[in-house]
Amino acid sequence: MSESYDVVVTQQKKRNKGLYAAATAVAVTALVPVASNAALAEIGAELSTEMEAGKLIIVAIMTLGATLLAMFAGYRYMKRGANSA
């Protein structure tokens, strides 16, 4: 005894993605407080400090690398003997 079932599939309405994106952008903009100039200046100062610290670390790593390279080259020179140059 096989029974047959009728399956009804309805087409969904197409959504306007641009409208939803615009509505989302407006909602986010309304929720974000307006930053004052003082807050922006404080953020800029903090970022500047972070960049200076990063630059200092990079220079220290490069100096350490150059020192190690010079020590290795000097060791090889001394290993050969000073008179061989």
Image: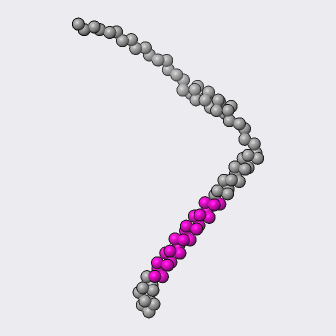
Above or below residue 69? Residue 55 is above
Q: Is residue 20 left or right of residue 30?
A: left
Give the image location of residue 14, x and y in percent.
50, 20
Residue drawn at the location 50% of the way across and 74% of the way down: 68
Above or below residue 72? Residue 12 is above
Q: Residue furthest bottom?
A: 83
Q: Is residue 54 left or right of residue 4?
A: right
Q: Residue furthest front?
A: 1
Task: Identify the coloring.
Answer: one colour
Give the image location of residue 23, x and y in percent.
62, 27
Residue drawn at the location 52% of the way across and 71% of the way down: 65
Q: Residue furthest left?
A: 1
Q: How would you classify the magenta stretch by its main secondary structure?
A: helix
Total residue callouts: 0
Residue 18 or residue 78, whichever sits in front: 78
The quadrant in which residue 22 appears is top right
Q: Is residue 77 left or right of residue 29?
A: left
Give the image location of residue 19, x and y in percent.
58, 25
Residue drawn at the location 73% of the way across and 49% of the way down: 41
Residue 55 magenta: yes
Residue drawn at the location 46% of the way across and 78% of the way down: 72
Above or below residue 7? Residue 31 is below
Range of magenta residues? 52-75
Q: Is residue 33 left or right of residue 54?
A: right
Residue 62 magenta: yes
Quadrant where the N terminus is found in the figure = top left
Quadrant where the C terminus is found in the figure = bottom left
